Image: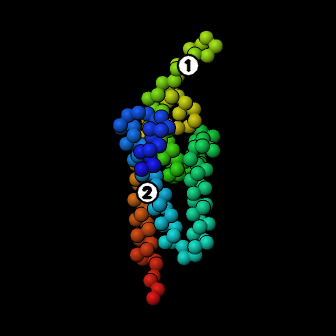
């Protein structure tokens, strides 16, 4: 509901496929985040420890989103940390959905600037061709993995107390 209201008000790409890609990304991101929190709440008996670990997991994901640290500014041996951040997958998918086919045209000081937004995406370390793979696919894989891990943890490691 939030995405349906905000999409038109913010002035994002006014196409039906663009809207549904936006909604798919939001839903998958929310499902993935909820499944991570579910796994942590099942795995830890202590509420305070689960809150601490959950905060650290979310901060790690936020750090490697691409807003604070670009992929290109990270040492090549550590660039895989962007891949395991589901925040990064959602952020890159949303950015690619909105900016991939956008053409920026501006006239400043008598000079005509014509710049594809895909160039701007690459300057910020985002891959302009990466909507379905790896971003949306990774979000779906993360969701299924964390949900399955939650089930396995609950089934085999949590004992019911009466």
Q: How is the image coloured?
A: rainbow
Q: Is residue 143 visible?
A: yes
- Kind of element beneath mark 2: helix
Q: Position of residue 66 (x, y in %)?
A: 58, 43
Question: What is the crowding at mark 1: few (fewer than 14 residues within 10 Å), some, or many (at least 20)?
Answer: few
Question: Residue reaching furthest top?
Answer: 110
Q: Which mark is residue 146?
A: none
Q: Above or below — where is 33 with respect to 20?
A: below
Residue at image position (46%, 52%) is 29
Q: Position of residue 134 (x, y in %)?
A: 43, 45
Residue at image position (56%, 14%) is 112
Q: Above or below — where is 15 with respect to 57?
A: above
Mark 1 in CB contact with mark 2 (< 8 angstroms)? no
Residue at image position (58%, 75%) is 46
Q: Position of residue 92 (x, y in %)?
A: 50, 42
Which residue occupies the foreground of this view, 24 or 131? Answer: 24
> Could you say which quadrant of the image residue 130 lies in?
top left
Q: Position of residue 113 (x, y in %)?
A: 56, 18
Question: What is the crowding at mark 2: few (fewer than 14 residues within 10 Å), some, or many (at least 20)?
Answer: some
Q: Which sits earlier in the primary sequence, circle 1 or circle 2?
A: 2
Q: Which residue is mark 1?
A: 106
- Kind of element beneath mark 1: strand
Q: Which mark is residue 31?
A: 2
Which residue occupies the foreground of this view, 8 or 91? Answer: 8
Q: If the image is split into quadrants, where does the C terminus sit?
A: bottom left
Q: Is residue 96 visible?
A: no
Residue at image position (40%, 70%) is 151
How many numbered discs sit on the rendered protein? 2
Distance, label 1 to label 2, CA atoms, is 39 Å
């Amino acid at each position: 509901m939030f995405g349906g209201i905000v999409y038109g008000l913010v002035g994002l790409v006014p196409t039906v496929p663009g809207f549904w890609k936006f909604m798919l990304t939001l839903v998958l991101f929310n499902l993935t985040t909820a499944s991570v929190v579910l796994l942590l709440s099942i795995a830890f008996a202590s509420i305070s420890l689960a809150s601490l670990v959950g905060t650290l997991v979310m901060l790690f994901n936020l750090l490697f989103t691409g807003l604070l640290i670009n992929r290109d500014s990270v040492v090549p041996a550590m660039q895989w940390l962007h891949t395991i951040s589901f925040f990064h997958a959602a952020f890159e998918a949303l950015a690619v959905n909105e900016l991939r086919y956008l053409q920026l045209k501006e006239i400043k000081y008598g000079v005509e600037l014509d710049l594809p937004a895909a160039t701007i995406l690459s300057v910020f370390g985002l891959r302009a061709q990466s909507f379905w793979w790896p971003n949306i696919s990774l979000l779906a894989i993360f969701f299924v993995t964390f949900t399955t891990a939650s089930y396995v943890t609950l089934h085999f490691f949590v004992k019911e107390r009466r």
